[in-house]
Amino acid sequence: MVRVYMTALEMGGYRVMDAANGQQALEVVRTRNPDVVILDLGLPDADGLDLIPQIRANTASPIIVVSARERETEKVRALDSGANDYLTKPFSVPELLARVRVALRGQAQLGGPSRSSISFGDCTLDLEARLLTRGGHPIRLSPTEFKLLATLARHADEVVTTNALLKEAWGAAYRAKHGYVRVYMHSLRRKLEMDPTRPRYLVNEAGLGYRLRTSF
Amino acid sequence: MNTSNKANAWRRAAAAFGRDLLGLLVVGAVTAGGLQFGAAEDVTNITVSYLFVVAAISMYLGYRAALVAATASAVCIDYCFLPPRYSFVIANGRDLVTMAAMFGVAIFISSLNNRLKKQARAARQSEKRTETLYVLLRELSTAHSVGDLCMAAAKQIGVASGAACVVLLRGATGELARAFGAGGPVSVGGEDTEVALWAANRLEPAGQGTRNSPEAGACYLPLVAARGCVGVIGLRARERGASLVRPSSLVMAMVAQCAMSIERTLLTEEKQAAQLEAETERIRNSVLSSVSHDLRAPMAVIGSAASTLMEHGDRLDSRARTEMAKIVNDEARRLNDLLKSLLDITRLQSGGLQVNREWESLEEVVAGVLRRVEEQAGAGQLVADVPGTLPLVQIDAVLIEQVLVNLVDNALKYARSGQPIEIDIALRSSVEVMVSVVDHGAGIAAGALGRIFEKFYRNGETVGDGLGLGLTIAKGIVEAHSGRIWAVQTPGGGLTVHFTLPLTALAPQISETELGEGVQP
């Protein structure tokens, strides 16, 4: 399986290094400093989840975790402990390449000046001026709504766990009050989406969190 | 079985003596009466009176008293009425004959009465015995399990024997593993297990009242049936310190009947278990063969497509190559779905399904379903009607999304093109929300509406793929959420599946003012 993905990534123009287990992975991260780390949570020797903080300690590069279907709790823990995004096995090559692209774009922004405005659909969010416009007209957002949207925008096209959103908007004390996030997202969808019941941009990923899609 | 007791014997002797005395008193009364009214003139009259009295005594005071009375009567007649009076000499030969005749008749009537009474008593006893056996049989026949059977037996035998009765059943290893009293199961054990086991192995009564180990604390009667001993009946005297005598023939008959009934019930249970095992085996084999066929089909296609690419890849044009690759991709996906279904159903059945409940928005769940269906089947196949004011529900979003996907997949298989499938959500009451998946396809016959949720059920026409587990899994998930799921016919044709989810605790509410708090800073 690794061979298939390595081939696909190489075809996509990337240079690929692989590691067979957790030990080797840390070695590669320390010595070769990759731009993106793709980590399978089902590694033989180490619990993939334990590896994430260790990788994080050695690099700021984005980590994409690969996990089996219906292991949402595992994915949430991975994302909360430092991973940036996930892929569900079996995934297609286009999905893999898309995720890598998004991860690298986010990475590029960390180096330079942060994106001051994000556009999706007919909306534009100006993070510096804290202004949201739709079709040129300003949209009123409550402070909480803005915080949530801004968090999603800063991680545009990456998944943000519900816990992370709660922490951003209400602080660490509100962990596990997922209901609050739902209500606010509902309100945001009504303000920003053409069809709130079929959202294109503010997308919920069941059991995980939300993703603001700017590219398709 | 009555307890033997010296006091009782004395009492009986005293009672008999009392009856004799009473008889004598009556005879004395007749004598006095005869003397008073000058019966000496006509001895025949008085003789008849004595006869009558003896007959009455034999009816009411018993044979012994009657004999005593008859003898007394003869003596009185001789002494008081036969000439010469007031002496034991009988002058007239005819009188002697009369007296002898009276005595003879008295004895005869008494013994007849006695026999009559004995027969009546025997008949009553026989009737009582039959009734006891009948009651036992009736109780045994209405018992549904071996346990009930033993409890009924213990009760009836306890009543018939006047002792406390326990039924001990033999287990597979020959040990007396289970025990039942009249009220319910009791624990096996105590000081007499050896004696009981001995009785079971030797098929002979042991314990009190028998010739084997009579010093034991109770009496043990083996339950002997056609294929050997199925257990032991234990009888213990109700009064402390009392000791049982040999069990009556009625009790032995009841024990024999119980043995047969117990064996029959055990055999029935064994037969049922064997039938169940055979049926399970049959189903398992048929499922295995069906499933392996369903799994092998996509594998075969993948194999052929891949080998085609390998061997003829360079000769195929790019369109054909892409097509082969697409086939491999599609079949792999199908295989993955099949395997996932199998895994899900196994988890459901073994109780390993983890339901992670959080406050979720059904609107979001439906949006997820719409996305997934569009990815796989293209746009326009599915429409949803979700009210904007739905409260949040406490569900596992991933699982409920799965339910909807399974229901929609099922509908897609049987839907007619042109009419999209609908998802409707409505509040059924303040404690229940109902989700409905409506298709306008071929529909299902009314009789099969309940069966579609069964494992591996596929509608008559083998349309497309799938193992027939989708609806079963959906049902399992809904029920794990304490909801209900059922199917009805869509008016105008088609199938509608409804499921409910409970609205339990108060959903988190945020006031409108909180939501729209303040302008942007």
Image (cartoon, coloured by chain):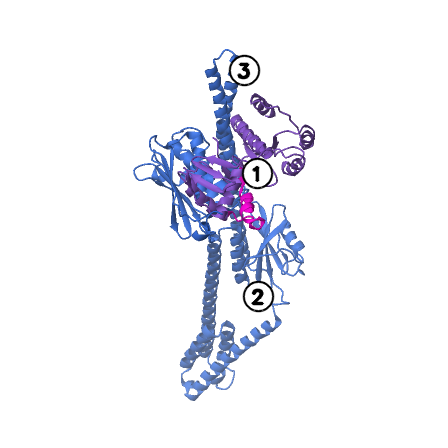
Q: Residue at x 47, y 62 (%)?
A: B128
Q: Residues within 10 Å of mark 3 (few under 14, many from 20)?
A: few
Looking at the image, do the residues carrying marks 2 and 1 touch, with CB atoms under 8 Å apart?
A: no
Give the CA separation, mark 2 to mark 3: 96 Å
Q: Which residues are magenta?
A: A159-179
Q: Position of residue B282 (x, y in %)?
A: 49, 34
Q: Colour of chain B?
A: blue
> Of helix, strand and loop, which one carries label 3?
helix
Q: Earlier in the sequence, mark 2 or mark 3?
A: 2
- In the visual, does A190 lie left or right of A117? left
A131 or B397: which is nearer to us? A131
Question: Does B457 sit above or below residue B112?
Answer: above
Residues at marks 3 and 1 on the same chain: no
Residue B67 shows in the view: yes
Vertical position of residue B165 compared to residue A74: above or below = below
What residue does disc 2 label? B2
Contact? badges 3 and 1 (CB < 8 Å): no
Q: Give the numbered dot on residue B310.
A: 3
Mark 1 residue type: Lys
Q: Is residue A163 highlighted in magenta? A: yes
Q: Provide the chain ID for the residue under circle 3.
A: B
Of tags 3 and 1, which is closer to the observer? 1
Residue B348 has which mark? none
The amino acid on which the numbered mark 3 sits, given as a three-letter code, is Met
Above or below residue B24? Residue A196 is above
Q: Which mark is residue A75?
A: 1
From the rendered image, report the letter of the chain displayed in purple. A
Residues B442 and A119: in front is A119
Q: Are marks 2 and 1 on the same chain?
A: no
Q: Main secondary structure of the magenta part?
A: helix
